[in-house]
Image (cartoon, grey):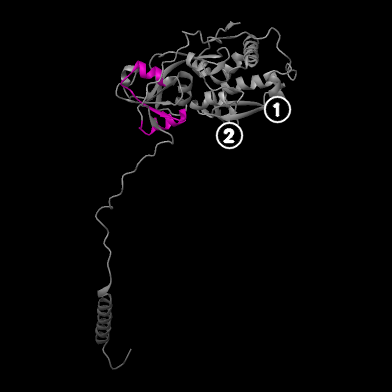
């Protein structure tokens, strides 16, 4: 402290200096830009939920599935004696497959529990896949000699016609229309077309689908039957059943229709949807094969008959479809020729 200056005077001078400095700061910042927080966030663009690729609105009327007028479910009789694995008859369709070293199977990876890719192992599995594995075992003695070709429902018939697959095992219903282009085994499963809808949606049967958006995969018999049973429904088609489930979850369709077993597989993936209503009609699944390969049709029918006789069909059902309840057993085969 300066001995000649009073303490109070020193404090006043110090305060004055701070006032001068503060004023300088104010002057220096007089040109600064200040930011004031807005009272509300700026408006943002409304989100648009994308649709799966390949979504279309059905513009034509599909035929109602018909398996009665031509006795479609009657197939060729199996051979009296099935050949042993790796001993296929010379020059037969099965011998050509055996020489190639693999069975080429058209199927799907989005139709749980019939054919789907297991998320843990990456393997293609399901009821239909087990049927294909049984055919492979009968030819090679090995159920794993299979090359899978993933097909959409709409591609199944063309894949058989152009010979890119040996068989299609993909929830393929036997109908008179399809028999004009491909051949079928005897039925190996009977399904019933029903409806999948959100819980508490108020949709309980086909009458509730008037003026509603109903999803189905292209190339399936489900479309024609729905158009006949509920002409006021707006049919939206997709490439896969998984796409239908996504659209249902996003509110882009009001319901999905197809066979009960496929719907049960979709419902298992989402607790907020349920299968509703009575059955709309029976669907007889068969193994599809190219026309003119009658020896292969008889051979596959022999595999299916053996699996029914030895209990393998029931084991396959219990593995994949037990959530549908007790089985009534495999379809009764009707043979011709």
* SS for callout 1: helix
Would you say residue 225 sits in the magenta stretch? yes
Residue 310: x %, y % from top left: 65, 11
Quadrant in which the N terminus appears: bottom left
Please state which of the two labelled residues, at mark 1 or mark 2, is closer to the viewer: 1
Q: The magenta stretch spans which residues?
A: 223-252
User: Label 2: how many residues lie within 10 Å, few (<14), some (14-19) or many (20+)?
Assistant: few
Would you say residue 44 sits in the magenta stretch? no
Q: Is residue 142 visible?
A: no
> Which disc is residue 100 wearing?
1
> Which disc is residue 120 wearing?
2
Left/right placement of residue 126 relative to residue 94 reads left
> Which disc is residue 309 wearing?
none
The number of discs equals: 2
Whether residue 21 is situated above or below residue 297 in the rendered picture: below
Q: Counting residues from the N terminus, which is met first, the one under dot 1 or under dot 2?
A: 1
Left/right placement of residue 313 relative to residue 98 reads left
């Amino acid at each position: 402290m300066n001995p000649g200056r009073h303490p109070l005077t020193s404090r006043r001078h110090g305060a004055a200096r701070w006032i001068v400095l503060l004023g300088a700061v104010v002057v220096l910042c007089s040109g600064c830009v200040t930011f004031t927080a807005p009272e509300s966030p700026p408006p943002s663009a409304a989100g648009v939920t994308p649709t799966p690729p390949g979504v279309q609105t059905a513009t034509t009327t599909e035929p109602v599935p018909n398996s009665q007028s031509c006795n479609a479910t009657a197939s060729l009789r199996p051979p009296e004696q099935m050949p042993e694995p790796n001993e296929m008859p010379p020059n037969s369709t099965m011998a050509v497959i055996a020489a190639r070293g693999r069975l080429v199977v058209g199927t799907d990876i989005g139709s749980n529990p019939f054919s789907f890719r297991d998320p843990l192992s990456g393997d293609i599995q399901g009821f239909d896949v087990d049927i294909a594995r049984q055919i492979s075992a009968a030819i090679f003695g090995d159920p794993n000699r299979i090359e899978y070709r993933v097909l959409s429902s709409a591609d199944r018939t063309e894949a058989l016609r152009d010979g890119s697959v040996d068989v299609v095992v993909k929830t393929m219903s036997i109908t008179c229309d399809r028999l004009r282009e491909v051949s079928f085994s005897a039925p190996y499963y009977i399904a019933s077309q029903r409806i999948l809808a959100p819980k508490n949606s108020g949709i309980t049967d086909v009458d509730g689908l008037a003026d509603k958006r109903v999803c189905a995969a292209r190339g399936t018999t489900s479309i024609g039957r729905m158009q006949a049973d509920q002409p006021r429904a707006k049919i939206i088609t997709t490439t896969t059943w998984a796409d239908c489930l996504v659209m249902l979850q996003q509110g882009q369709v009001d319901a999905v229709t197809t066979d009960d077993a496929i719907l049960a597989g979709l419902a298992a993936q989402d607790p907020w949807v349920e299968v509703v209503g009575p059955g709309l009609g029976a669907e007889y699944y068969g193994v599809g094969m190219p026309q003119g390969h009658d020896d292969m049709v008889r051979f596959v029918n022999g595999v299916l008959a053996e699996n029914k006789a030895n209990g393998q069909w029931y084991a396959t059902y219990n593995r994949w479809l037990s959530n549908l309840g007790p089985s009534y057993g495999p379809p009764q085969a009707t043979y011709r020729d």
